Amino acid sequence: MLNLFEVIETNNMIEHERLDVRTITMGISLLDCCDSDLNKLNEKIYEKITKYASKLVETGESIARDFGVPIVNKRISVTPIGLIGGCACKSPKDFVTIAKTLDRAANKVGVNFIGGYSALVSKGMTAADENLIRSIPEALACTERVCSSVNVASTRTGLNMDAVRLMGEVVLETAKATSKQDSLGCAKLVVFCNAPDDNPFMAGAFHGVTEEDAIINVGVSGPGVVKVALEKTRGENFEVLCETIKKTAFKITRVGQLVAQEASKRLGIPFGIIDLSLAPTPAVGDSVAEILEEIGLERVGAPGTTAALAMLNDQVKKGGVMASSYVGGLSGAFIPVSEDQGMIDAVTAQALTIEKLEAMTCVCSVGLDMIAIPGDTSASTISGIIADEAAIGMINQKTTAVRVIPVIGKKVGDTVEFGGLLGYAPVMPVNRFSCEKFVNRGGRIPAPIHSFKN
């Protein structure tokens, strides 16, 4: 039971420390929408989404008013479209019609984004999967709210290098297709290893096939709250530091649990999970980088950065998991460059490189996220970056991802403005030595030996 002190403490976190619920995401299964007729398939998808999510935005806004908790985004995730469109879609153009339907449905119910324009190809690609992947550049260029993801590897199945090679080409084509918006389409495209079925955060959200017909997943945030708590522990040892992070993560997650349960009750849809990630924004004071610097780093990227991030990620999970009945998604600490002012400052100061970010992804929630790179970067280099990150996830049995943005017409040192929660980013250099022969070998890198656990 909440006491008066806890109520006051929570209000203070909301008013002064930027605590918010980053997203309420409704997952909707489209498995029962399958049809061999493309028009009927699109009709069924539109009708189901608009029926289930008709009150999602209204409910989120009413909960925010009633409880005084900011709820930044209301979103939808759907069953990976690569699994739904196989019977009706015979070409990439056919899949684009589904992207337009998703966008129209998202606009109708008023959500910020809809995720699930996705394919799961860690072991191999069906013809439908390949058609969907090849449709991504056009799909993201002609829609506003659709987000896309492709899972190219897993610890159980290995790393599909044919898919990795294709995704390098698709990322570059998406950048070109949206070049008038500074290649913004790539900000809505993520390439995964070990993608979770219940992630509420975009651009990687989709509704896994093991989920119920519809569920409510909530993603919380609160880097500012953690930073303020750590300011009070300056000079203390790591035991005190860890306890402080755990207790703060517990409090943040309790707010998310409250919102999730209330949304579930009001919408009549089962509660799924809380994703207890520390997700930053471009706003000053809402930065994971600033937490790491409060721990004792002069700048993120300095020696000790990976160890500090590992500790932060672990303590967030330990504190948060005790505060919710179900924890899932990604859960930990996000390190997107463009969405975190502290990360941007570290890149500008040349303290942080892509190679150091890659090392940090070994211990954080996800991977190389919202990184602007030169527009003349080759498709094979992008594929190599994806392969490296997927290998980290595959070997370490964790989720990793790549969301890089080759900004057409921009070079190292330029700055790109994406706007809103996506923020802005300095264009970072990439290694200019070629990996083309490696990427073009084709086939699949086998699963690691420790994946055999049956």
Image: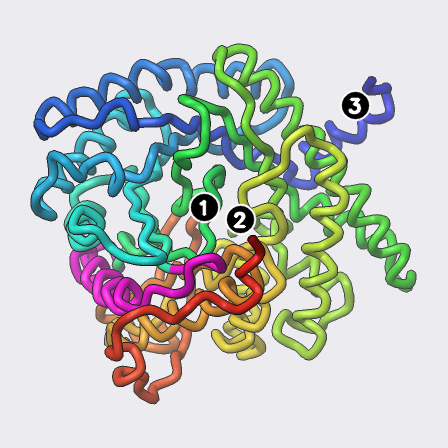
Q: Is residue 72 left or right of residue 13?
A: left
- Which amino acid is tagged 3? Val
User: Label 1 crowding class (10 Å Cα cut-off): few <14, some 14-19, many 20+?
Assistant: some
Q: Is residue 352 left or right of residue 28?
A: right
Q: CA distance from mark 1 to mark 3?
A: 28 Å
**Residue 255, image x and y in percent?**
68, 28
Q: Earlier in the sequence, mark 1 or mark 2?
A: 2
Q: Is residue 14 magenta?
A: no
The residue that mark 2 highlights is 281
- Which amino acid is tagged 1? Leu
Q: Are marks 1 and 2 in contact (CB under 8 Å)?
A: yes
**Residue 127, image x and y in percent?**
16, 51
Q: Secondary structure at mark 1?
A: helix
**Residue 18, image x and y in percent?**
64, 40
The residue that mark 1 highlights is 421
Q: Main secondary structure of the magenta part?
A: helix
Corner quadrant of residue 369: bottom left
Residue found 65% across the figure and 43% down from its top:
222
Segment colored magenta: 153-182
Q: Is residue 158 magenta?
A: yes
- Which amino acid is tagged 2? Thr
Residue 324 vs 351, above or below: the answer is above
Q: Are marks 1 and 3 in contact (CB under 8 Å)?
A: no
Q: Secondary structure at mark 3?
A: helix
User: Label 3 crowding class (10 Å Cα cut-off): few <14, some 14-19, many 20+?
Assistant: few
Q: Earlier in the sequence, mark 1 or mark 3?
A: 3
Residue found 39% across the figure and 39% down from its top:
206
The residue that mark 3 highlights is 7
Q: CA distance from mark 3 to mark 2?
A: 25 Å
Q: Nearer the viewer, residue 157 or 414?
A: 157
Corner quadrant of residue 97: top left
